[in-house]
Image (cartoon, grey):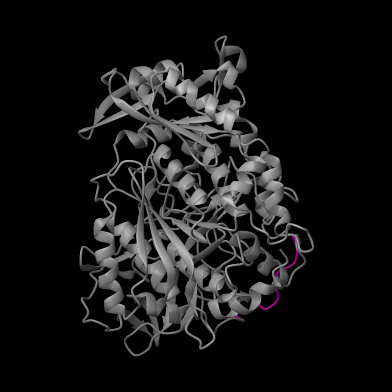
Amino acid sequence: MKKPLLYATLALGVATASCAGHGGLLPSAPLSNANALSNNDAPQNVPAGWAATATTAVPIKNFPTATIKSATPLHIVVGLNMHDRKGAQELVASQYTPGHLAFHRWLTPEQFTARFGPTQSEAAAVADYLRQQGFRHVQIEPNRLIVSGTASISQAEAAFHTSIRGTASNGALVYGNVKPALVPAKLHGLVAAVLGLTNAWQMHVHLSKSTQPIRPLAGGTPPPCLQVVNGICIGGEYGPPQYQVAYDATCSSCSTGSATSIAVMAEGNVSQVIKDLRAAESFWGLPAVSYSTVQVGAKSLDTSGVDEWDLDTQISSGFAGKVRHLYVYDTTSLSDSDIALEYSHWVNDNKTQAGNSSFGEPEALAYADGAMTLDDEEFNQGAAQGMTMFASTGDSGSGCPVLVNSGGPVGGTPQVCYPAASPYVVAVGGTTLDTNANGQEPGTYYGEHVWVGTGGGYSAFESAPYWQTNGICAGCTAGRGAADIAMCADNNGCPMDVFVNGTQTGIGGTSLSSPMSMGLWSRLETHFGNKLGFAAPLYYGVYGYYEPCPLGSKTCTPTGEPGDDTSALPPDTTAPIGGFHDILYGSNGIPSSAAPGYDEPTGLGSIDYYVMQQDITNSIF
């Protein structure tokens, strides 16, 4: 995706916060929520009659001249605080506590809003204020966590006691609020954040194209191995059927995702996506899935992300074999304000069991403008409703890329990406997958190691949820660990053959591993009647049940590691822990390296579908 060059400068100017406190039995409130004022002027510096929000100022040095016209329209998303954030977090914990009255009892959006959301009168008060300030098209979202509207630059400046400057960058207008966003004192404690005052901080897709030419194939022809060494396909092309074989999802008792609905979060003009999906389904011999687009906000002509949305739709529904319905949520841009509104629609529609976000931004940016505060509330609601959002961890090693993905270690700022850092998503890292060659074609699983480009690390802003701090993730006492799981992402070692504008294109990155994980999860959900709920605690619960060492042990090394899963030689040797392939080798940049047990680049490991289908019922959560 093309982004303003100014974006890199802005991101690097954001200071990181100190690490979050220790997690406990329950998820601690993320620092973005618990200390909403820490990003802003200290209370004594807030003018009388005003109150601070979590939305900080964009560094003024990035806007040397005020070139933006005061009449320029902005779409503003005002995020509201939940009434009982701690109670909403405790609910998710109780839903995964066997024997609790709330165990596996998911709420409806209406039930969640009634228990934890702002009241209708509170949301109406914010809406009335916007109208009084001249905002048009003011709308309250069903869960009352967002009130949005359209206003001019000058109206937005007056409404939030800020100043907005702009500059030309790469032929586009880039603007930002150079003063923190404030609200009238009467709205103190109600308004969490104000998004849309800047377009300089945006999400970016986590997609890495293959540098090797993809070999054009005839319809139905299996993809080839590009390199076979001693019977091992160590570099090959893959399609959904080949990934199904590699990850053990072709057994006679293996479920498809036929009863489960999934969603892809997208932006721009997605009209080509359905055409490419149908071409891919015909080529791979897959059933045509039921498909629809959900428009969120104004339509956009941007087609720069078509390759991403093609990848997401083709691998998620393709790995699933079949899904009940595939929704593409399509918003205007990858700005924090548009993405927040997209997440709101996803949780309030409550149409799917899972969603996928193959994009992100350095978590310091999401924290700085308040998007982290608002999105975490939406994800918390989704988890309480039994929904799972999968998010890619990034393609620049242990640093989250700012402008472009480098496909190499430490290519961006030294911090994890958001939304993968949220405790209420499943963060998906990447591996290099090697298979036993089937002649000149990819075959069954041989082994994996860390893909050097995968994201992974510990959050400086989000506390670890309780399913990480029960001893499985030793480093998570410093903050939320991402990744949670991993699958193939190597853009040259195991790229997917994706149809983009009708042409076969090799694509990898954690933009591949994340939607693949959603497709795998849809199979599990279908097998268990869509009653599994939020995937993260269940996956950690499976790991906790099969982990051969006592939870929390700092001296025990699981016996037999490495080498008791496959006969694979290093670096592809993995070890089984329940339905996981524990990744033992590789690094995405110092200090993020694989090791026995949980590690930042690959989390709990990749998933053997057939084994996981049997073992997930043993989850301790």
Spot occupied by residue 360 in the image (x, y as percentages of width and height): 43, 47
Residue 97, quarter of the rendered image: bottom right
Spot occupied by residue 134 in the image (x, y as percentages of width and height): 38, 19
Q: Residue at the spot x=42%, y=15% of the render?
A: 158
Could you say which is closer to the camera, residue 547 or residue 344? 344
Q: Residue at the spot x=42%, y=74% of the render?
A: 322
Q: Residue at the spot x=62%, y=37% of the render?
A: 82
The residue segment tinted magenta is: 554-563
Q: Residue at the spot x=61%, y=34% of the render?
A: 118
Say if 37 sits above or below 515 in the image. above
Residue 227, quarter of the rendered image: bottom left
Say if 14 sits above or below 253 in the image. above
Query: Is residue 557 found inside the magenta-colored segment of the image?
Result: yes
Is residue 99 visible in the rendered structure shown here? yes
Could you say which is closer to the camera, residue 307 or residue 196? 196
Q: Name the magenta segment's main secondary structure.
A: loop
Could you say which is closer to the camera, residue 429 or residue 68? 68
Q: In which quarter of the image is the C terminus?
A: bottom right
Going by the picture, which residue comes out furthest to the top?
48
Say if 439 sits above or below 9 in the image. below
Query: Is residue 495 found inside the magenta-colored segment of the image?
Result: no
Spot occupied by residue 160 in the image (x, y as percentages of width and height): 46, 19
